């Protein structure tokens, strides 16, 4: 061994030891851990109740308390992966085989979407479902389904634009939404298991293009960027599900926070950590963020403080903060951790936590899908439940 190589190894070992020494241990709230234990039981009972109401091959979408109607979807709806994904999280925590049986039933109905090339949401649909299945109950067929799903997602990438296309629209438009950052985790997984770096390169290129074009100077984001499909130039920036084009739609900010946290985890590129920290700063320093940390549906909604809250945005934020706190500096990390604790505590009680046997079996109340479209307004949503349960898991395992 040369002196140079020995020195390199020494420097590497020192850096590893320093990193380990600097890892923050977060103090868990024993009362909150008990609340979380109760949340798991309530959630499991709710989802077993919901399972009894579902028709074959139908996925829960939302529930309307005023009419008592459970709205469902087919497997090709972008939210189809959240229900089986939540079932698997709950099974992992409770060991209740009824939850696994129901998850398996829904996975069978969902499997065909691995070949769906008409949507950018295969990360939501397939990684939140089959990804959890592969973690908790691995099978060779799950691995192949996920690889096929990643391949299908990549067909929507155009190198001229540098992004995975979101919504299909007019020929002269190439629409990309901030939500798409959430689908990149599937591509990183595919590189890990196949060794094919093309998945990785597409994810990084998409994230870089989005970082360049989706964000304002204050690190709030637009919802939609419309690119010229021939040149890749930006044609328009707007917000579809928020209050206005220049407003900060709450769930969109949460998608960005979560997405760039994943980008840092998977690449260790500091620019992604910086981006995630900047987005966190926009959220936490926003004068319109309520004290309970459950955001209004849009940070610029015109009727604050009487604007609707969005439990789904809060759930995504809590889960993201509980990962980002490990990567950030000590001061910021503690702030992220404390914010997540506050969100979990508040979502775990009224008015957000549904009473047992109500809410169509959903766990949380008071989410907002798209207020401008008058769609899924102030109702439960499957992704609010999914990221809430994920946040509970992350809190429980914060120091592992």
Image (tube, rainbow, N blue to C red):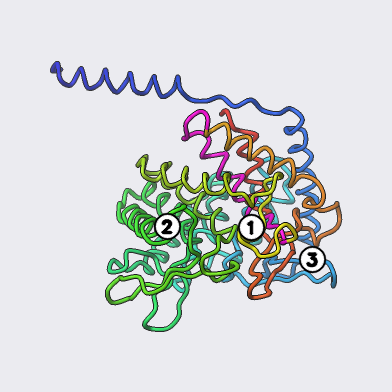
Q: Position of residue 131 (x, y in %)?
A: 53, 51
Residue in the picture at 49% in, 55% down: 220
* Residue where numbered disc 3 is placed: 53
* Residue where numbered disc 2 is placed: 147
Secondary element at image label 2: helix
Query: Residue 383 got which mark?
Result: 1
Q: Where is residue 106 in the image (x, y as percent from the top left)?
A: 64, 61
Above/below status of 222 relative to 94: below
Residue in the picture at 70% in, 44% down: 291
The one of 260 and 302 positioned closer to us in this rendering: 302
Of badges 1 and 2, the one in the foreground is: 1
Bounds of the magenta span? 307-331
Of badges 3 and 1, the one in the foreground is: 1
The one of 225 and 125 positioned closer to us in this rendering: 225
Above/below status of 342 relative to 379: above
Secondary element at image label 1: helix
Above/below status of 113 relative to 327: below
């Amino acid at each position: 061994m040369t002196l140079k190589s020995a020195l390199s190894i020494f420097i590497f070992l020192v850096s590893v030891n320093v990193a380990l020494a600097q890892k923050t241990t977060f103090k868990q709230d024993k009362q909150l851990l008990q609340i979380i234990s109760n949340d798991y039981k309530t959630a499991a009972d709710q989802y077993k109740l919901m399972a009894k109401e579902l028709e074959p091959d139908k996925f829960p979408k939302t529930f309307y308390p005023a009419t008592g109607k459970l709205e469902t979807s087919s497997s090709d709806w972008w939210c189809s992966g959240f229900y089986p994904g939540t079932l698997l999280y709950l099974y992992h925590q409770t060991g209740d085989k009824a939850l696994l049986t129901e998850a398996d039933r829904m996975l069978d109905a969902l499997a065909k979407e691995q070949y769906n090339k008409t949507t950018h949401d295969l990360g939501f649909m397939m990684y939140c479902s089959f990804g959890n299945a592969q973690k908790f109950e691995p099978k060779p067929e799950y691995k192949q389904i996920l690889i096929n799903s990643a391949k299908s997602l990549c067909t929507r990438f155009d190198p001229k634009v540098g992004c995975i296309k979101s919504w299909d629209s007019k020929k002269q438009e190439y629409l990309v939404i901030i939500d798409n950052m959430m689908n990149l985790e599937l591509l990183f997984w595919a590189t890990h298991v196949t060794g094919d770096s093309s998945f990785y390169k597409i994810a990084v290129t998409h994230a870089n293009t989005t970082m360049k074009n989706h964000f304002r100077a204050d690190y709030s984001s637009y919802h939609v960027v419309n690119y010229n499909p021939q040149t890749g130039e930006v044609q328009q920036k707007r917000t579809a599900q928020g209050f206005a084009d220049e407003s900060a739609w709450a769930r969109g900010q949460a998608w960005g926070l979560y997405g760039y946290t994943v980008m840092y985890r998977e690449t260790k590129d500091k620019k992604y950590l910086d981006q995630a920290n900047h987005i966190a700063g926009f959220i936490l320093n926003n004068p319109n963020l309520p004290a309970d940390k459950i955001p209004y549906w849009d940070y610029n909604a015109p009727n604050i403080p009487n604007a609707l809250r969005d439990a789904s945005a809060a759930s995504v934020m809590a889960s993201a903060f509980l990962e980002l706190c490990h990567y950030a500096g000590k001061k910021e990390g503690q702030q992220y951790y404390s914010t997540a604790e506050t969100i979990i505590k508040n979502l775990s009680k009224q008015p957000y936590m549904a009473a047992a046997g109500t809410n169509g079996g959903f766990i949380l109340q008071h989410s907002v899908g798209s207020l401008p479209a008058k769609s899924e307004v102030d109702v439960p949503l499957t992704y609010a439940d999914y990221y809430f349960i994920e946040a509970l898991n992350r809190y429980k395992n914060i120091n592992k």
